[in-house]
Amino acid sequence: MRSPEQLVERFRSEGLKITPQRQLLFSLLHENAEHPTAEALYTTASAQMPGISLRTVYQTLTDLTEMGELSQVTFDGGAVRFDPNLADHHHAVCNECGAIADVSIDHLDAVSISEPNHFSPSSTSVVFHGTCARCATPTSNLDKPTNNQTK
Amino acid sequence: MRSPEQLVERFRSEGLKITPQRQLLFSLLHENAEHPTAEALYTTASAQMPGISLRTVYQTLTDLTEMGELSQVTFDGGAVRFDPNLADHHHAVCNECGAIADVSIDHLDAVSISEPNHFSPSSTSVVFHGTCARCATPTSNLDKPTNNQTK
DNA sequence: GACCTAATCTGCAAATCATGCGAATAAGCA
DNA sequence: TGCTTATTCGCATGATTTGCAGATTAGGTC
Ligand SMILES: [Mn+2]
Ligand SMILES: [Mn+2]
Ligand SMILES: [Zn+2]
Ligand SMILES: [Zn+2]
């Protein structure tokens, strides 16, 4: 996703209005690597802008997605998560705390479908499930992230 | 998933009852490579057993999953799909018709996370999105599978 | 075969997540 | 300031899945 400033420009140039709700969401999403759900963004947004509607959060997220500024990902049937990282990347989901990390992958081109089933893949996505660095360290659990488990 | 006969044996040996509903679902799931949703199974089941409850379908699918006889998969936030294929495998989802095919993958072990982020993956799943063989053939579209798109 | 009882099935309420819709509101502009 | 129209908001509705409780039944006992 582009910077809030660039998004303001884009919205303006497309004749869309610059509302406080949109600006807040631009800033909450910018470089946000947490893959938040709509509800999570709503909670954060509400703290800064009491009265903002969950409906507006969904609306804005849908708009940004349709503009190609956001992508949506889901894991294991949980709620949709929003991802401002437009680079080609994959994900690592922690079984313990539910954290979702962006990962780059080496040798993805080596991966191929074994059987000659004539499927023409246009995209490939890889999801790792396992234990994240924080949850792996047996030290103090005091600073462990809260459980964001999808389901 | 094991054969209906073996499942009957397993259920019996665990003190579970062999009901017509369960037997029907055993047979509908056996070697079923369509990755059906609960609703889809309910529709098929209802044709053979009018009056069967959707709740029972869900219940049985949950039971089989907990017994390790079924696995559940979801794609793009759609409804949960049930998979009797217990072998380690991956999936190819057709963008056109929504068909989901099982695929085996070569060189998966070559795939690795680039950055040293200390994530310890316990499992890796790969999903291809693209066009299936049927949808790719420009011949008669009459025999194309119906659209089962997840969303 | 009749009887008993726990397991199962069923119908419906309710939870969760997401979208449709219309009325109220406010951004952008003359 | 006042107009126009996009946007926001609240609520209803839809889709999927689970909780619950009463009715039913499989499977054992006599
Ligand atoms: Mn990401
Ligand atoms: Mn499969
Ligand atoms: Zn973790
Ligand atoms: Zn297809």
Image (tube, coloured by chain):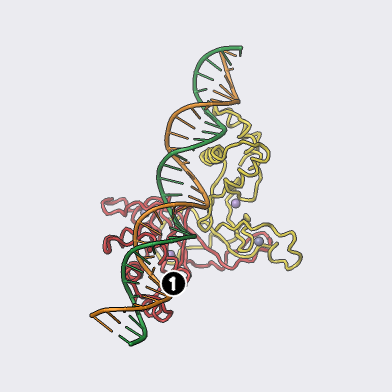
Chain colours: A yellow, B red, C orange, D green
Front residue (pair B50, A7): B50
User: Residue A107: x, y in percent?
Assistant: 57, 61
* Mark 1 vs ligand 2: CB below 8 Å: no
* Residue A43 against residue B40 in the figure, above or below: above
Q: Which residue is mark 1?
A: B69
Q: Please say if B25 is above or below B40.
A: below
Q: Which residue shows up at 67% across the image and 41% down it? A: A47
Q: How far across and how far down the image is residue A87, in percent? A: 59, 48
Q: Specify the amino acid type for callout 1.
A: Glu
Pick the front one: A74 or B20: B20
Quadrant holding the C terminus of chain A: bottom right
Q: Quadrant of residue A19?
A: top right
Of helix, strand and loop, which one carries label 1? loop
Q: A51 or A111, which lies in front?
A: A51
Q: Residue at x 64, y 51 (%)?
A: A34
Q: Which residue is found at the position 53% from the left and 66% from the top?
A: B108
Q: Quadrant of the N terminus of chain A?
A: top right
Name which residue lies at 39% across and 79% down: B12
Q: Is residue A118 visible?
A: no
Q: On the picture, is A134 further left or further right than B129?
A: right
Q: Position of residue A123 (x, y in %)?
A: 49, 53
- In the rendered view, does B65 fall on the left or right side of A105? left
Query: Can I make out residue B124 in this image?
Result: yes
In this rendering, the answer to whether A72 lies above or below A48 is below
Instruction: Please give the chain letter of the residue carrying mark 1.
Output: B
